[in-house]
Image (cartoon, rainbow, N blue to C red):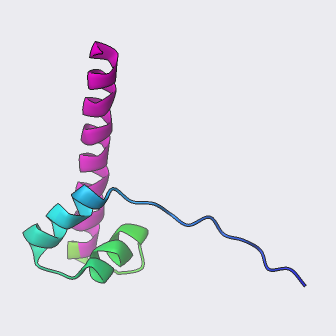
Amino acid sequence: MSKAKQKKATYNDTVIKELIVKYGFGRDYILKSIKGERTGTIPIKIQEEYNALVRVSNKIIKEQINQL
């Protein structure tokens, strides 16, 4: 018997730490909000801010790589 292997999601740890500081929630709550396991207005805001910050950070990293 073999179990199906699921790929473990990776998240930008720096962004998560900043969201923890901003909202004052624990890491578990922030991660579950990003995954969509929590409902409400705050988890939706957390998810939107996480996605926006990751897009911006990836854009800045690509720009820096292109300048090298």
What is the magenta segment's predominant secondary structure? helix
- Against 16, is 59 above or below? above
Rendered position, 26 above or below 9: below
Q: Is residue 60 above or below residue 9?
A: above
In the rendered image, the quadrant that contains the N terminus is bottom right
Residue at 39 percent of width and 60 percent of height: 11
Task: Report the side of 18 relative to 29 (left or right).
Answer: left
Left or right of 3 in this view: 36:
left
**Which quadrant holds residue 64?**
top left
Q: In this image, 20 relative to 32: left or right? A: left
How far from the left and from the top, in percent, is residue 28? 32, 82
Figure disc tally: 0
Q: Which corner quadrant of the image does residue 47 belong to?
A: bottom left
Q: Nearer the viewer, residue 6 or 49?
A: 6
Direction top: furthest residue: 67
Image position, residue 20 (x, y; %): 17, 72
Q: Is residue 48 magenta?
A: yes
Residue nearer the viewer, 68 or 14: 68
Q: Position of residue 60 (x, y in %)?
A: 25, 31
| Span highlighted in magenta in the image | 43-68
Quarter of the C terminus within the rendering: top left
Q: Position of residue 27 (x, y in %)?
A: 27, 78
The single residue placed furthest to the right in the displayed view is: 1
- Occupied quadrant, residue 4: bottom right
Decide which of 16, 52 is in the foreground and name it.
16
Q: Is residue 1 left or right of residue 12?
A: right
Q: Residue at x 17, y 81 (%)?
A: 25
Residue 24 in magenta stretch: no
